[in-house]
Image (cartoon, rainbow, N blue to C red):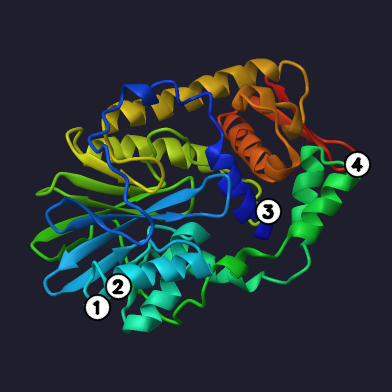
Amino acid sequence: SGEFFRGFLMEKLKERINNKGAHNLIYPFNQIPEPGKMLKIADGIFWVRMSLPFALNHINLWVLEDGDEWVIVDTGVASAEIKSNWRKCFNEDMKSKRVNKVIVTHLHPDHVGLAGWISRKFSAPLYMSRSEYLMCRVLVSDTGREAPEEGMDLYRGAGFTKVQLDSYAERFGGFGRAVSKLPDNYRRLRDREVIKIGNYTWEVVVGSGHCPEHVCLYSKDLKILISGDQVLPKISSNVSVFPTEPLSNPLEDWLDSCHYIKERVPNDVLILPSHNEPFRGLHERLDNLISGHERNLERLLDLCKEPKRAIDVFSVLFKRTISDDVLLMATGESIAHLNCLLLRNLISADKDKNGVIYYKKVL
């Protein structure tokens, strides 16, 4: 789980084959807020950008006016620097007014990391979807544990060497180090639920694939979608298989979610993503993400005319050489694409006597 966090951040930085249309989007803001400062971008909507100590070096967070109080959407990782910048926001731009809700789009530490800290500081309830809250609690509980045999089996099956398996085992168990203690209760967010914040209502739009039950927030009146990692303008969110659910099909979930969001949310909205800059062109971006993954699946199917392991297919999915620091995420995404083809009955999967899985196109 610790390597999950590290790899997740590194992988999201990579330029992906399915991002060719990103340059056609419209970016309406020339200014980016400095850490610890809030930039107003719409009525009652403020943009906060915090630094991250990773190759993906920033995250966008959002502060919403709620009468004389505030609502925070996503929080950054649990680090001294980000805490200090939040304190600056609290004392200056937020004028020491109370935060009454902490909304977290999904479980990844750059989003949920300081949710518990802010929640306790203001006695503000935590709002998350059920799957994200419970999965986050599970991953935090893995902190300090030894790597499970199920994880070793998954990566052995993908074709890892003994050295690579040892590296996975050594790095496992650090997820909770970037997450402050979560509250022991939370307020569940459900798809299509409506929340009133200040003068506006926000509809919950749930996606999946990047994580189990990702919350986006859509305001019809403001024509704004807070998209989290579900829709990003310049990078494609990681869609991976993990040891806890080795036969899952997150890529099909991701593709279904892209279609669903396109149906739920009109094209004329302003998208507030967690990484890169706010943009317009939602439907174009969703179409680009869908077509990019489908092209990757076609290339992968062609590659599997001869038997391939998960680690043999990186060239189809990634432009850059896969280094050790992103090996787990690249492998997880490769397995996600292979599982998708497998569950579409287009390839077969056969395990050899050493537990290594070979995938081959069904003729």
Q: Amino acid at mark 1?
A: Ser
Give the camera-side residue of 286 and 318. 318
Location of mark 4 (residue): 354
Q: Nearer the viewer, mark 2 or mark 4?
A: 2
Label 1 vs 3, first from the N-terminus: 1
Measured in 3D between alpha carbons, the distance from the residue under mark 3 to the one under mark 2, in whole angstroms, is: 40 Å
Res. 96 mark = 1
Query: Type of residue at label 3?
Result: Pro
Q: Nearer the viewer, mark 4 or mark 3?
A: 3
Q: Residue at x 13, y 59 (%)?
A: 201
Left or right: residue 97 compared with residue 260: left
Which of marks 3 and 4 precedes in the sequence? Answer: 3
Where's the N terminus, which quadrant? Answer: bottom right
Measure the alpha-carbon separation of dots 2 and 4.
56 Å
**Which numbered marker is on residue 208?**
none
> Which residue is identified by label 2?
90
| Real-space CA distance between mark 4 and mark 3, rounded to the nearest whole angstrom | 18 Å
